[in-house]
Image (cartoon, rainbow, N blue to C red):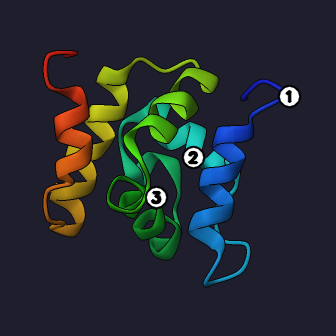
């Protein structure tokens, strides 16, 4: 369970939900980052797809800060990114990849 104050996890969930209504929660975002796997984070296909797209839609700094809030290392966040690309055949998230160059 994420800590009580999770502004970045909540911001990501709010952003992903904007066009759809409540689909994912801050806990879903944290679970996805911890698991490094979309299917372990959410059973709903729409929720999985929204979580996958966070790497394309959000600044890497936001995902990094949300990872910190969730108690996740960047390696786990990178595993989620790779899982998302494979599962949804997503294009590269160049900003995410560039942000991790030299860090991992």
Q: Nearer the viewer, residue 77 or 1?
A: 77
What residue is shown with label 2? 29
Badge 2 density bin: few <14, some 14–19, many ≥20, Cα 10 Å: many
Element under disc 1: loop
Q: Nearer the viewer, residue 83 or 10?
A: 10
Q: CA distance from mark 1 to mark 3?
A: 21 Å
What residue is shown with label 3? 51
Quarter occupied by the N terminus: top right
Q: Are marks 2 and 3 in contact (CB under 8 Å)?
A: yes
Q: Could you say where residue 59 lies in the image, as x and y percent from the top left?
A: 42, 48
User: Which numbered disc, 1 or 3, marks the residue that appears first in the sequence?
Assistant: 1
Badge 3 density bin: few <14, some 14–19, many ≥20, Cα 10 Å: many
Q: Could you say where residue 47 lies in the image, as x and y percent from the top left?
A: 52, 67
Q: CA distance from mark 2 to mark 3?
A: 7 Å
What residue is shown with label 1? 4
Element under disc 3: helix
Q: CA distance from mark 2 to mark 1?
A: 14 Å
Question: Residue placed at 47% from the left, 67% from the top?
Answer: 50
Q: Could you say where residue 15 lies in the image, as x and y percent from the top left?
A: 61, 64
Question: Residue placed at 19% from the left, 57% from the top?
Answer: 85
Element under disc 2: helix
Residue 17 left/right relative to 91: right
User: Which numbered disc, 2 or 3, marks the residue that appears first in the sequence?
Assistant: 2
């Amino acid at each position: 369970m994420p800590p009580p104050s999770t502004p970045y996890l909540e911001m990501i969930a709010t952003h992903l939900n904007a066009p759809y209504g409540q689909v994912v929660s801050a806990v879903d975002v944290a679970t996805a980052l911890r698991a490094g796997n979309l299917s372990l984070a959410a059973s709903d296909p729409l929720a999985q797809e929204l979580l996958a797209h966070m790497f394309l839609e959000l600044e890497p700094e936001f995902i990094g800060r949300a990872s910190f809030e969730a108690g996740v290392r960047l390696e786990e966040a990178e595993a989620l990114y790779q899982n998302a690309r494979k599962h949804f055949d997503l294009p590269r998230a160049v900003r995410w990849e560039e942000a991790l160059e030299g860090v991992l």
